[in-house]
Amino acid sequence: MAIINQLKTTVLLGILSGILLGIGYWIGSTKGMFIGLAIAILMNFITYWYSDKIVLAMYRAREIKKKDNPNLYKIVQEVALATGIPMPRIYIIPTDQPNAFATGRNPKNAAVACTNGIINILSPIELKGVIAHELAHIKNRDILIATIAATIATVISYIAFMARFAAIFGGGDDRDGSNIISLLVLGILTPIIATIIQLAISRSREFLADETGAKTIKNPLALASALEKIHVAARRTPLRFGSPATASLFIANPFSGRSLINLFSTHPSLESRVKRLRKLAMAL
C-alpha cells in the first residue's frame, strides 16, 4: 500500500503540473504566468521556513520538557528512535478536543503537538499509535510535498483569476464569442480541479502516515482504536480557535466531525482508515 500511495502522490502532482503548463500555454500570457509563479514560490518559501512557528502560535501551543510530562516525552522518544528520526520538540495545545499534528520543514527541525484532550482520553498504546502517525509525516517529508502541491495549486488559481478578469473586462470584438466563454470556464473550473487534486494528495499522505506509523510500532489496531475515539470526541468538542485552512495538519479534522463532500475533505473517511489498518494488522 505504501508504494501505491507514493505513486498516487506522484501522479497527482504530475496532473497538477500538467494543468499548470496546459493553461499557461492556452492563455499564452507567459509574462503573467511567470509573475504568478514568482509570487506563489515566494509565498510558499516563507510558509515552508516559518509555518511551524506560525501554526504553533496560532494554536497557543506551549513547548514542554521531559519533567513537564514524562509519559508523553517517553512515548515520543521511543517512537522517534523506532522511526529513525531525531527527537522532535514537543508541544501541548490547551484544548479538550483530542487531536495532534506534526510540523517542521525537515526531520532535524520538527515538532509534534498534542492537545490536552488527546492525552486525557487515549491509553498509552493508543497515544503511541497517534505519535507514530505524526512522526511518519515527518519521516515521509509530507510538509515539503504539501508545500509543492500548494505552490502549483496557487499558481493555477492565480492564472484562473487572470482568465476570469480577461473574460469579464477584456473587451474587444470577441466579447460575446467562444473565446470569452472558454476563458470563463477555464477561470472557474481549473481552480476547483486544482483544489480537489491538492486535497487528494493530502488524503493520500494521511493513508501513508497511517501505514508507516502502524508498521513502526507494529500495532495497527492501536491507531485504529485511537482514530475511532478521536472522531467521536471531535464531533462533541469542535475546536474554537485556529483556522480551517490548517485542518489538514491534524490527525483528524478539528473543525468538523464529518465532511459534507468527500472530494473536498482534507482527510480520508474514518471508515476507510480503520478498514485499512485492520487489514494491515492481519497481514503483520
Image (cartoon, rainbow, N blue to C red):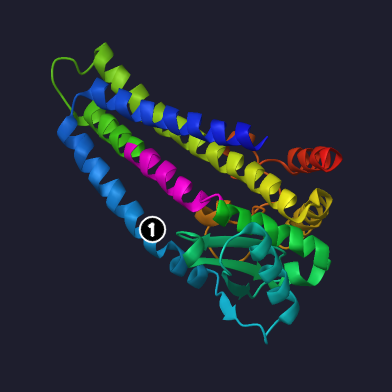
Tell whether 277 sits left or right of 21: right
Q: Is residue 159 above or below residue 75?
A: above
| Residue drawn at x 60%, y 73% as measured from the top left | 90
**What is the magenta segment's predominant secondary structure?**
helix
Check the image and name the residue furthest to the top: 178
Quadrant of the rendered image containing residue 20:
top left
Tell whether 188 sits left or right of 104: left
Residue 69 versus residue 249: which sits nearer the camera?
69
- Observer able to see residue 122: no
| Residue drawn at x 45%, y 50% as measured from the top left | 144
Quadrant (top left/top right/bottom left/bottom right) for the N terminus: top right
Residue 47 in the image, given as x and y percentages of width and height:
38, 58
Check the image and name the residue furthest to the right: 282
Q: Which residues are magenta?
A: 140-155
Q: Is residue 92 above or below residue 201?
A: below
The amino acid marked with disc number 1 is Thr
Tell whether 151 sits left or right of 240: left
SS at mark 1 in the image:
helix
Residue 9 in the image, given as x and y percentages of width and height:
53, 35
Residue 197 in the image, given as x and y percentages of width and height:
50, 33
Q: Is residue 38 above or below residue 115?
A: above
| Residue drawn at x 20%, y 42% as measured from the top left | 35
Q: Is residue 224 magenta?
A: no
Per the image, the residue denoted by label 1 is 47
| Residue drawn at x 35%, y 24% as measured from the top left | 186
